Image: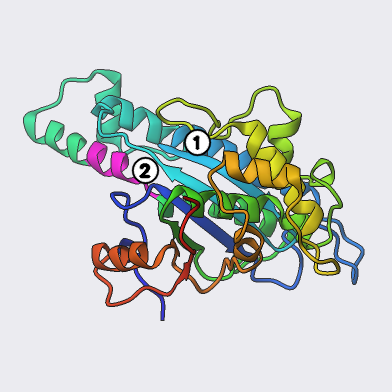
């Protein structure tokens, strides 16, 4: 049974959410179909370009992403846009969607009576709300990609498997664990042997690009509160030991990176290997999951429990 988004997303509890969207067809979202020989690799760039465009418009930042063969992962941070003026909200919404005639007249500076102004204000309030909504964020991405794929495939019908899945990340440790899980997806799936080979992931973008549109690491108010170098070291070293065909171990370099990120070396590999993207609505400690259930007005929450943090 599906759960309403209002019962899964609670910004007052956490602004961070892990999102997974999966293709419904046997044919790949991306990659190469071995049965037909058709390549869909170009669709990865479609998706990244659309994600970047939508993120530049919405009050939502992308922390990490991975574009896989038949699904993709995002880790998002919901921001605030309460201070946006009605005009700013309308202009921003118009970057993706058309506006009602009354709103267009308002932006053009036409004279409007009081009832028309109130109607415009109502529209602006609704658009302001949508522009910090994960549901609308994903709608703006998935509808666009589905339309392009259907046109290319010369078919109609659903392209995505039901609605997207979301997980609340209830603290910074859950956030870092999930980001590492997302960034290591190609290595875990044997699609890449190293971070340098992990195409269409946020970790490769952070390594290769001097400047990126992703939410930055740093000490700014809105930054991810860690140093990028420590995060890259942690993901790189973890990727070297996470394979199923070898016993996991904490090297000196990995242990140092984990300590800098305030993660527990004694539990890190088990937590990462045990991370699940499907079937769990939240990630955090037992107490955090209980509080999350209360705030989202649910009797219980099926979530991944993390062990006590590093003291």
The residue depicted at 64 percent of the width and 71 percent of the height is: 24
Left or right of residue 168: residue 65: right
- Asked if residue 185 is positioned above or below residue 47 in the image, the reply reads below
> Which residue is situated farthest in the bottom direction here?
1
3D distance between C-alphas at marks 1 and 2: 19 Å
- Determine whether 248 is above or below 217 in the image: below
Q: Nearer the viewer, mark 1 or mark 2?
A: 1
The image quadrant of residue 195 is top right
Mark 2 or mark 1, which is nearer the start of the sequence? 2
The residue indicated by pointer 2 is: 132
Question: What residue does disc 1 label?
Answer: 224
Q: Nearer the viewer, residue 185 or 49?
A: 185
Q: Residue at x 45, y 25 (%)?
A: 220
Front in this rendered view, residue 204 or 101: 204
* Magenta highlight on residue 126: yes
Residue 303 or residue 40, whichever sits in front: 303
Report whether 203 appears left or right of 92.
Answer: right
* Residue 120 x %, y %: 20, 35
Question: Where is residue 80, by image quadrant?
Answer: top left
Percent coordinates x, y for residue 45 in the rendering: 72, 43
Asked if residue 202 can be seen in this view, the reply is no
Highlighted magenta segment, given as a residue range: 123-133
Q: Inspect the magenta stretch and tell me whether residue 282 lies in it.
A: no
Q: In the rendered image, is residue 224 in sight?
A: yes
């Amino acid at each position: 049974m599906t759960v309403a988004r209002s019962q899964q997303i609670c910004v007052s509890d956490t602004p961070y959410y892990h999102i997974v969207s999966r293709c419904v067809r046997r044919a790949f979202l991306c990659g190469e179909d071995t049965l037909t020989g058709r390549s869909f690799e170009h669709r990865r760039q479609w998706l990244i370009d659309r994600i970047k465009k939508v993120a530049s418009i919405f009050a939502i930042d992308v922390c990490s992403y991975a574009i896989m063969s038949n699904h993709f992962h995002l880790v998002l941070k919901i921001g605030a846009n309460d201070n946006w003026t009605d005009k700013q909200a309308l202009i921003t919404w118009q970057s993706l969607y058309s506006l009602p005639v009354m709103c267009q007249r308002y932006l053009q500076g036409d004279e409007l009576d009081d009832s028309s102004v109130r109607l415009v204000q109502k529209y602006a309030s609704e658009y302001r709300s949508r522009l910090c909504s994960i549901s609308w964020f994903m709608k703006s991405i998935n509808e666009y990609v589905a339309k392009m794929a259907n046109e290319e495939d010369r078919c109609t019908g659903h392209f995505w498997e039901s609605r997207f899945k979301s997980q609340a990340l209830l603290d910074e440790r859950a956030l870092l664990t999930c980001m590492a899980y997302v960034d290591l997806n190609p290595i875990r799936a044997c699609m890449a042997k190293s971070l340098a080979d992990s195409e269409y992931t946020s970790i490769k973008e952070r390594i290769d690009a001097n400047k990126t549109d992703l939410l930055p690491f740093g000490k700014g108010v809105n930054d991810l509160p860690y140093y990028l170098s420590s995060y890259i070291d942690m993901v790189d070293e973890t990727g070297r030991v996470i394979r199923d065909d070898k016993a996991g171990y904490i090297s000196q370099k990995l242990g140092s990176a984990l300590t800098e990120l305030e993660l527990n070396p004694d539990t890190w590999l088990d937590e990462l290997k045990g991370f699940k993207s499907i079937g769990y609505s939240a990630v955090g400690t037992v107490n955090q999951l209980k509080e999350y259930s209360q705030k989202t007005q649910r009797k219980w929450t099926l979530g991944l429990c993390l062990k006590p943090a590093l003291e």
